[in-house]
Image (cartoon, rainbow, N blue to C red):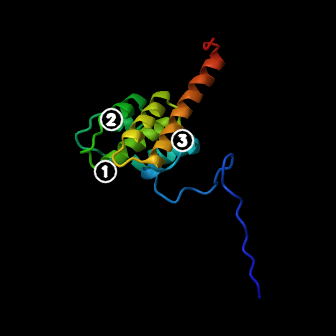
Amino acid sequence: MKTHKTKKAPVGRGRRRCEPPPIGPLLWWRTIRADHFNVAAAGALRASIANVFIPGEPTWRDAADGDEAAAVGLALRLHKGTSPVTYDLVMTALAACAAEDGAAACLAMAHMLRGFPGAGRAEARIATSWLVRSFMKTTSSEEETGSGR
């Protein structure tokens, strides 16, 4: 008896997967392109860091709760010696702000992904996606207000 395998629709440009990514939210920031982030993703990211405390980081709670300036500031202070767990937590807070179209957070995501220890081509592509998102958001805001002329 022959069995038939069902074909899945191809995933490519213009098509998005509907199923959630197979990794936890703390890794989304470095593995998923910007166009897959939205308000629902921001909620999932924030839920994953809601009960976390980072000792010695007085602005952590603000960043985790959605303060874009605090998240950007924390991210820009990360360095090669920062523990991987802290790096993932801070970048998750930043990604949540960027997912809600915070222009500064989108730019910081692009910058941080390019400088991430061990970053390669995949991270560069994800960084570029955040840069494009930032530009598109800025352009659409200017068109809405008429200030880009």
Where is the N terminus found, in terms of image quarters?
A: bottom right
Q: Residue under label 3, please give it.
A: 34
Image position of 49 with respect to 140: above or below: below
Image position of 76 with respect to 17: above or below: above
What amino acid does circle 3 point to? Answer: Ala
Q: Residue furthest right?
A: 1
Binning the other alpha carbons within 10 Å of mark 1 as few (below 14), some (14 to 19) or many (20 upward) gives few
Given this view, does label 2 or label 1 mark the residue nearer the observer? Answer: 1
- Of the image marks 3 and 1, the number of the one nearer the N terminus: 3
Residue occupying the point 46% across, 40% down: 95
Binning the other alpha carbons within 10 Å of mark 2 as few (below 14), some (14 to 19) or many (20 upward) gives many
* Figure quadrant of residue 3: bottom right
Instruction: Calculate the distance from the C-alpha at mark 2 to the C-alpha at mark 3.
Output: 20 Å
Binning the other alpha carbons within 10 Å of mark 3 as few (below 14), some (14 to 19) or many (20 upward) gives many
Q: Residue under label 1, please give it.
A: 84
Q: Residue under label 2, please give it.
A: 74
Could you tell me if the residues under marks 3 and 1 are in contact, i.e. CB atoms within 8 Å? no
Residue occupying the point 51% across, 48% down: 32
